[in-house]
Amino acid sequence: MRKLNLVAMSYDKDAILNALQRTCAVEIVSHAAAENAVVSEYETEGLKAKVSSVEAALSALCTETENYEKEHAMKSDVLKDGFDVSYSEFMAAKDDEARVSATLERINALTDEKNSLKAELVKCARSIGQAEIYATVNEPFSAFADTRHARVRLGTVASTGAEALKAALFETELCDVKTLNATGDEALLLVVSHKSVAAETEGALSSFGFTACPYGGETTGAEVYANALRRKEELLAALKKNVFETYEMRSEIRPLKIYCDRLSFELEKAETGEKLRTTERTFLLQAYVPKEAEATVENELKGTGKTTFFEFFDPAEEDEPPTLLKNNAVVSNFESITNTYSTPNYREFDPNAVMAFFYSLFMGFIIGDAGYGLLMTLVGGWLWWKNRGRPTGTSRLAGAFAIGGLFAILWGALFNSLFGFAIFSKTVMPNPQTDMWSLAGIAVPSVLVISMVLGVFQLFAGYICRAWQQWRRGDIIGGICDGVIWAFFSVGVGLAVVGFVEEANVPILGTVGGITAGVSLALAMLTAGRKEKLFGKFTKGFGAAYGVINYASDILSYARLYGLMLSGAVIGQIIATYAGGFIVSGRVPMIVLGVVLLIVGHGFNLVMNLLGAYIHDARLQYVEFYGRFFEGEGELFTPLGSKRKYVYLLPANAEK
């Protein structure tokens, strides 16, 4: 990584930032203090509000389009992100503001109209519910008015209390009640009483929750109900028209997405201003540029025709450059796994190549079935290949699973398992369910011993990585003392484990391994405090000896490989046994059941195994392996203008 210092006239800032963005190779950082220069201040709230309004309208349009296509069983590519956009089209989108404003106004108007229609529909539904019980009233409501001597009441009560109310009113002389309509919840009553008993009648009605008719005039109940239903149909028709008109605007999704990303770039440039320093007429910029892109950046700056002064130089020791990972097509699939934990910092070596091997090795071991591995390789490989030109997080993870599938095929062949069925008459590896080894006189599952030996192998690699990291920084002694010596200790432990297994029949390895581990530990204790004074040497040496306990704990962590592998193997074998029994029965229903059991059972088992393998395999890398040497705390290299949500911006030279 190289550092760029640039000075140019303030009025050329936008053109220069556009030129730097074209290279996709410049990450601007906060400028150090400079004489007669101050930190730039830029107002970004207006741009943020504008981006937010465009995204809100775009989201509403996309949601309506997606819902319309689902409802009508339609499918189109209009909603897909990541479509190609030429550089000239992307930059020209800024000049399309008039069209965008009109589009946003139309979308917002349709959205407001839809919300209003939906709110009115809710009110209309309430009106229909209220008017439904009056649908049988064919006389005008004015006909139910009081007379000179009688009080007339039309209204509803709960169905559960209607009969009790009628009974109470019948006890009152000069009062009559008639049920005009009834539904499951309420009853419509007509109550006529002499005005001399009006008070008693009203009291009874009130006690039973009588609700007076809300309608009046010359309209009948049937007309009120019919009008409410008609209004509902009108609202539904208007809503349908609104949805269709919104869907007809789907062609605006693409230009809106381009405009939104273009606007976000303008916002990024404005926010970049906070990292610059300015004088009365100039601005000062500092950035990081990959060494191989130095010539490209230089040519772009010169091609602007603007007066600029710039220089490239190596970062200082106190600088913290961003990390630009450079791996081949295989290893790059595993970068996201490391970055989930922490991005490697600029001054340490990239561990992804070594981690990728162990991650795949352990994933294959956990899956432990050639059939499962074949499915992982085919499906994962297809997803990776489909997106190879423009990889995503999902396609990279699929690529990692595909590579893990290759190791699963290898381990499956060694463990003699193909979808739970034995594929060879003899097996290379011991049976994970039944075979036991005698480890120092104690019966231990054989595959458990193998998993711990694999762990010792990875810890050995971790210490070699630590040594290499120290040597890259010129600390030869530190690499030997903190890395190589502990790597030899791991070799000794591994040899001792194999030697103590009686079935291996190589007891000499136990002696050799014990001596190697003992001598290595003694050297580690003697050299641990090499930079400390007298008392510090003692405490550091004691700490090195105490670290053996942590080392043993780390080795035991690899037992999870055996546990996960065993659970998947047992389930797979059970599925294969039952399904095979159904199939060989010869009866068609049983054969169908056996095939279904194979597909569903193995599908479920594979998914669960993959989930466990992904999580626990990553945990072994993060804690046991990276704990030996990895520093992390880096920041990924993020060039100016590389943050886009919707479009894939073709390189500027792609149009030439």
Image: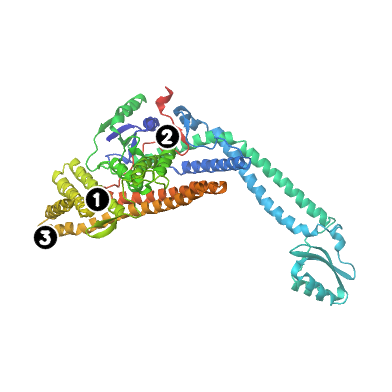
Res. 393 visible in picture: no
Res. 159 visible in picture: yes
- Whole-number angstrom distance, CA of label 1 to CA of label 2: 35 Å
Q: Nearer the viewer, mark 3 or mark 1?
A: 1
Instruction: Locate the N terminus by quadrant.
Output: top left
Residue at position x 54%, y 46% in the image: 592
Q: Is residue 217 left or right of residue 484?
A: right
Residue that label 2 marks: 385
- Whole-number angstrom distance, CA of label 2 to CA of label 3: 59 Å
Residue at far right of view? 148
Question: What mark, if any, has residue 535 been given in the picture?
Answer: 3
Tell me which numbered mark, 3 or 1, is placed earlier along the sequence.
1
Residue 276 coordinates in the image, percent (x, y): 34, 39
The 10 Å Cα crowd at callout 3, few under 14, some 14 to 19, many 20 or more, is few
Q: Is residue 250 left or right of residue 558?
A: right
The secondary structure type at the circle numbered 1 is helix
